């Protein structure tokens, strides 16, 4: 884990230690659960969507530093965004980690997670919350699993 932390920017460590938007929503309209059995990460994601916009988003669960930091950064990135913009961010994020694209635009702070792509096992930790977001948006209430 230490060599992995060497790659981390302070931003990731901060977000994993004190995640933003951690908890539950009172007025959720969409939700999904995600599980990454390889690492043991579990997430529950709740959204309040109004007029196609993600008005509020929160997550809870247990996970490794990468899973927590990504979920925290993701919730910040997609809040006040439209569903389509959120899905575009997911595509961009996957392009950065899975396809190793270096010129993905618009990822903002999420680019801090780029180093994760050197650790293929950890990519699933970083994409778990996005898969849950995708499932929640698509109203698929079944649990998503990275396997
Ligand atoms: Zn993990």
Image (tube, helix red, strand yellow):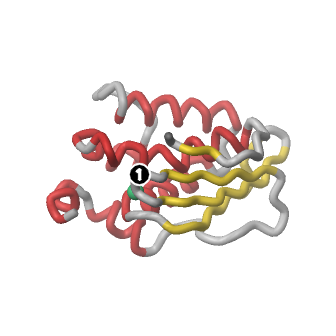
Q: Residue at x 65, y 62 (%)?
A: 58
Assign a secondary structure to mark 1: loop
Of residues 47 and 78, the one nearer the viewer is: 47
Q: How dense is the environment of label 1, judged by Cα within 10 Å: few (below 14), some, or many (20 and up)? A: few
Q: Is residue 65 left or right of residue 83?
A: left
Q: Is residue 51 left or right of residue 136?
A: right
Give the percent coordinates (x, y) of residue 5. Answer: 22, 62
Of residues 55 and 144, the one nearer the viewer is: 144
| Vertical placement of residue 5 versus 86, above or below | below
Q: Residue at x 71, y 57 (%)?
A: 46
Q: Residue at x 55, y 60 (%)?
A: 42
Image quarter (top left, top right, bottom left or bottom right) of the N terminus: bottom left
Q: Residue at x 77, y 46 (%)?
A: 141
Ligand 1 picture quarter: bottom left
Number of numbered discs? 1
Give the percent coordinates (x, y) of residue 35. Answer: 55, 53
Of residues 22 and 39, the one nearer the viewer is: 39
Q: Quadrant of residue 81?
A: top right
| Vertical placement of residue 81 versus 105, above or below | below
Q: Is residue 23 left or right of residue 77?
A: right
Does the Cβ of the disc 1 residue fall within 8 Å of ligand 1?
Answer: yes
Q: Which residue is mark 1?
A: 38
Q: Quadrant of residue 39?
A: bottom left
Return the residue found at the far bottom: 18
Give the percent coordinates (x, y) of residue 11. Answer: 33, 62
Give the percent coordinates (x, y) of residue 137. Answer: 73, 40
């Amino acid at each position: 884990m230490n060599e992995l932390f060497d790659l981390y920017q302070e931003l990731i460590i901060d977000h994993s230690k004190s995640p933003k938007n951690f908890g539950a929503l009172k007025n959720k309209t969409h939700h999904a659960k995600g599980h990454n059995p390889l690492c043991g990460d579990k997430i529950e994601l709740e959204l309040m969507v109004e007029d196609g916009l993600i008005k509020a988003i929160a997550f809870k669960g247990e996970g490794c530093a990468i899973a927590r930091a990504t979920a925290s950064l993701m919730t910040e990135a997609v809040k006040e965004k439209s569903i389509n913009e959120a899905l575009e961010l997911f595509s961009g994020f996957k392009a950065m980690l899975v396809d190793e694209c270096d010129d993905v635009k618009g990822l903002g702070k999420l680019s801090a997670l780029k180093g994760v792509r050197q650790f293929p096992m950890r990519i699933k930790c970083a994409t778990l919350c996005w898969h849950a977001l995708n499932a929640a948006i698509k109203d698929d209430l079944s649990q998503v699993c990275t396997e």
